[in-house]
Image (cartoon, rainbow, N blue to C red):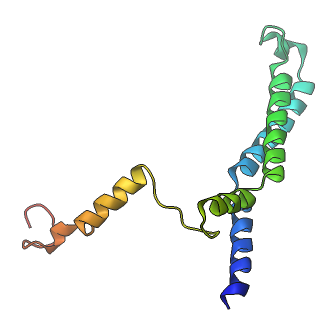
Amino acid sequence: MSTEQAPSTSRRAARAANLFDLRRIIGGLFTAWGILLIILGATDSEAEANKAAGININLWAGIGMLLLGLFFIAWALTRPLGEQLADAAEEEGGEYPARAAPRGVDAAALASHQRSGGTRRDRDRTGGEGGAGT
């Protein structure tokens, strides 16, 4: 049972990680805006270029954004996030998808929450719902 579910679960987690990979989202947005600016820059008049010291800024910014967007998409496709997470889990000796231990602020918040036994302890006190003066 667990041997058949583990590959399916890891494949599903890798697919979900790749689907919501920010490199793909950012790359898609930069590519779309780059294409839009290239079209706008290619159809600009000379008066529009003179507004930016004679430089067709829409065209150059569009080319830069298109190249950056294509770089992000190529990066996401050549190094999928699911593979990177699986490699990291193997290095740590864990199993993918492993739940990472919280670090930094999350670890401090978790430790504080565990010490206090939860939040909203004022509701347990006598005096009502914890509101002032009740």
Q: Quadrant of residue 20?
A: bottom right
Residue 122: percent from left, percent from top = 16, 67
Residue 48: percent from left, percent from top = 83, 16
Placement of 85 over or under 50, stated as above or below: below
Q: Nearer the viewer, residue 90 or 75?
A: 90
Q: Quadrant of residue 70?
A: top right
Q: Please tell me which residue is depicted at 72% across the width and 61% down the height of the picture.
A: 82
Q: Please tell me which residue is depicted at 86% across the width and 29% down the height of the picture.
A: 63
Q: Please tell me which residue is depicted at 72% across the width and 45% down the height of the picture.
A: 26
Q: Name the quadrant of the N terminus.
A: bottom right
Horizontal side of residue 84 vs 95, given as left or right: right
Horizontal side of residue 126 vs 4, given as left or right: left
Q: Please tell me which residue is depicted at 30% across the width and 63% down the height of the picture.
A: 113
Q: What number of labels is visible?
A: 0
Q: Is residue 43 visible?
A: no
Residue 130: percent from left, percent from top = 15, 67
Q: Nearer the viewer, residue 13 or 4?
A: 4
Placement of 127 over or under 26, stated as above or below: below
Q: Quadrant of residue 94?
A: bottom right
Residue 8: percent from left, percent from top = 73, 79
Horizontal side of residue 17 vs 114, given as left or right: right
Outermost residue to the top: 53
Q: Name the quadrant of the C terminus.
A: bottom left
